[in-house]
Amino acid sequence: MEDVPSRNLVASLVAAGAATLASSVLADSALEHYRGSFRNPAMVLPLAAAGLGIVVNAGRALGRDEGRSIGISSHVGSMGVGATGLGFHAYNILKRPTAGGMNGLFYAAPAGAPAALILSGLLGRTADTLRARPAEQRDAIGRPLAVICAVGLLGTVAEAGLLHFRGAYHNPFMWLPIVLPPMAATALARDAASGSAHPMTQMLLGATVALGLVGVGFHIYGVARNMGGWRNWRQNILAGPPVPAPPAFTGLALAGLGALLLLRQRKEHHG
Amino acid sequence: MRSYSETEAVDFVIVGTGAGGGTLAARLAEAGFSVIAMDAGPYWRPLEDFASDETHQEKLYWTDERIVDGEHPIKLGSNNSGKSVGGSTVHFAMVSLRFRPEHFKARTKLGYGADWPVDWREMWRYYAEVEDALKIAGPVRYPWGPHRGRYPYRAHPLNAAAEYLARGAEALGIDWTETPLATLSAPRGKAHPCVYRGFCVTGCSTNAKQSVLVTWLPRALAAGAEIRDLAMVGQIETKNGRVTGVQYHREGEWRFQPARNVIVAGYAIETPRLLLNSANGEFPNGLANSSGLVGKNLMVQLNQAVWGIVEDEVRSYKGPPSLAISEHWNYEDRGKDYFGGWSYMSQGPLPITWARTLSGGRGLWGQALIDEMARVNHSVGLKMVGEVLPDERNRVTLADECDQYGLRIPRVTFAFRDNEKAMIRHALDFMDQSLAATGATERWQESDDTCHLNGTARMGNDPATSVVNSDCRSWDIPNLWICDGSIFPTVGGVNPSLTIQAMACRTADRILLANHEAS
Ligand SMILES: Cc1cc2nc3c(=O)[nH]c(=O)nc-3n(C[C@H](O)[C@H](O)[C@H](O)COP(=O)(O)OP(=O)(O)OC[C@H]3O[C@@H](n4cnc5c(N)ncnc54)[C@H](O)[C@@H]3O)c2cc1C
Ligand code: SF4
């Protein structure tokens, strides 16, 4: 097999994105489903799926390969568990009384978390495809991948927007994930449409990668602002903003950078 | 904290630091006036001084000696008055509602009670100011009344007790919503968000509750006001038809604080008591009492409830006690054989309160009481806040007995009339239907509770039929003001504190305006 560094880089970026999303889902669902006392045995499934997803995708991001079949079962498993979770969470929201429609959306099971698991499976699958395809067929993946990342980013923005609205945007920094990722998503979608990669898009996606990591810091601070702070971590990690949530932006933006590289190569190859 | 001397008159002495007095202290100090706000109660620091213990926290209540009589003597104490810096809001239930606009003109619009001498639109602006000052956590859309702006913070999650109210309302086809509450649903400055342990009516030990103690009073201090705690005002002195200052009891002795203006804000029993106790040669019937109305038209609110047992574990004591509300019967006038409105809310009684309810309200004792207490996690209830009409026979007068300060104690005379009885019947029946619709069994009615104290120094447009004018200024004495629950001409079917604070903000602005015009 030929060894084109950029191919490895793209597949690695996308796999890293999938692994990051899976990590976010693993930590988040572990916390939230622990809060829900794992009342339904199916509540362990996202932990298992995300756990496997981390192993497989992180391995591939680092150039290792646990084999094709385990890859497929991991990716398809993530998508399946994510889709089922979406159904459960929708039921959880809808079974509540709905004054003004918002209390359930604010406080019931979130739609964003299982959606992130679906995206993680989708990205993992895409990374595998990238590795398997001959070079001249890879560029074509750039556009659909860019669209997936853009849509995923916008979905994550919607989730952050809803939950930060629940927090009444009491800290002005809570606007950051509402402002920056949509700019990155729009730029990426525009590049996918025009078929050319802009440097600005790369900057915006890079900033979104960083935002997801900085967000963890903000959420750690947010937990500290609850009664008892981190000394009372066992309660406050559940009461405060979800510490593992923001890296969903990082994961999607990493994969978006991969998509951008493919768009650039396509331009180079096709002029 | 700044402190003023007793040798020089300050611009304002405010008697009482609760919803009325605390709010005014902040607004007037911020406007540049020199202000001393006195309170008979102590200045608590909730984080250190409050325990999660119903008995210990009785230290917050006004339990000085009083005489209650009449056909339905009011139970005074925990459920209606506080003796603390911050007033009753230190242990209030945080429900923060606006009056229905028509209720400000009950006489002309709805044919009962009396009109307020203010326009609801103006009050609407002051409500918004107070809601922002307290960062009220409320629903995204309020189902009743004219448009209101977005609440500053989002509503809290519903507890199971609130879901029972919601399901019942939906079954009966009426609107309900998340109750606008004065407790934080997100951090604010150094204050943490609510931790949902439900000790609200014994005083919040986390400072999530946005009482006067943690909202207006820090502002007052920052603006240079002095809060003089443990200072019981016994008499307001006058000379040549104007007040000159207050006699107050502190650290075992009577002292005098001169003031250019005095504002009385001691709530609807202590306010008329102080005005009556201040009678002197110039004002033999008490201060501000040329109409003879000081102490009259005392209005509590109806606080009847329906309780039942459900299969789920509800644990209704989790979280603030009233997370869901229906104001349907404040805004719907059809189908009533009485005047006025009422709202009802979900409930979350603490253990001792619940034991009292079961023994006093339901008559359980011994093993029956113990067995019922053991089912507390499955108990669920709905409680009304209902309008009592003004009636001069319901009143506060002075008894001959004296209290620990040597001051004559108040006698509180009260009876329900036919209108109240009809409203109670309707409300209990309706709440019973609502609980029944959610599958609650073994339902029973708690039929004699009351809450809140209003009236006794009503505001109005005519000196013959009111004690203060629309600026809360006494008709008789130009530098004496009354601004608390006692100025209410009617009470409506909502809890009063938001209206008291809105009126205090308005009064501050009116004082400022008058001051500008004079200078
Ligand atoms: C248990 C409980 C729950 C409540 N829940 C709600 C609710 O959910 N929503 C709502 O809107 N309202 C509620 N209320 C009612 C609300 O707290 C009162 O209506 C409001 O605080 C009254 O404001 P005020 O300024 O008239 O009097 P207060 O807030 O009672 O303040 C009066 C202050 O004056 C002081 N004082 C009195 N006389 C003197 C004197 N002579 N010298 C010195 N100091 C004096 C007292 O110590 C007291 O601190 C509740 C009340 C209680 C008790
Ligand atoms: S439930 Fe919330 S408002 Fe009530 S006492 Fe606890 S922290 Fe304070």
Image (spheres, coloured by chain):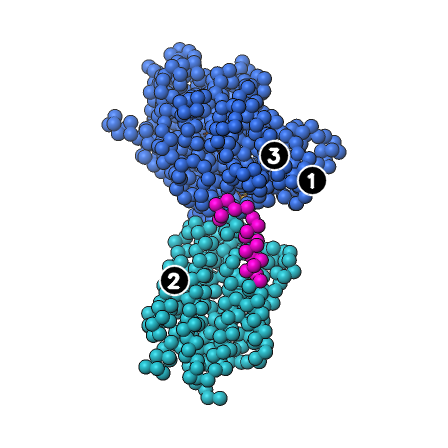
Chain letter, cyan: A
Report which residue position mark 3 lands on. Answer: B433
Report which residue position mark 2 lands on. Answer: A182
Extent of the magenta region: A84-102
* Residue A92 inside the magenta-drawn segment: yes
- B479 lies left or right of A106: left
Picture coordinates of residue A187, whole percent (x, y): 35, 67
Q: Chain of mark 3?
A: B
Chain letter, blue: B
- Secondary structure under the numbered disc 1 in the rendered image: loop
- Secondary structure under the numbered disc 3 in the rendered image: helix
Instruction: State whether the magenta stretch is mostly helix, strand or loop.
Output: helix
Question: Is residue B308 in view?
Answer: yes
Q: Chain of mark 2?
A: A
Tag 3 or tag 1, which sits nearer the N-term?
A: 1
Vertical side of A70 occupied by B4: above or below: above
| Residue in front for this viewpoint, A171 or A221 | A171
Amino acid on which the number 1 mark rests in the picture: Arg
Question: Is residue B233 in view?
Answer: no
* Residue A177 inside the magenta-drawn segment: no
Report, in whole angstroms, how far the alpha carbon at label 3 lies from the one at label 2. Answer: 49 Å
| Number of marks present in the image shown | 3
Does the beta carbon of the residue at mark 3 sit less than 8 Å from ligand 1? no
- Single out the mark in the foreground, 1 or 3: 3
Which residue corresponds to the image point at 32% horizontal and 35% vertical from the top-left?
A: B31
Report, in whole angstroms, how far the alpha carbon at label 1 lies from the one at label 3. Answer: 22 Å
Report which residue position mark 1 lands on. Answer: B375
Mark 3: give few (<14), some (14-19) or many (20+) Cα within 10 Å.
Answer: some
Q: Quadrant of the C terminus of chain A?
A: bottom left
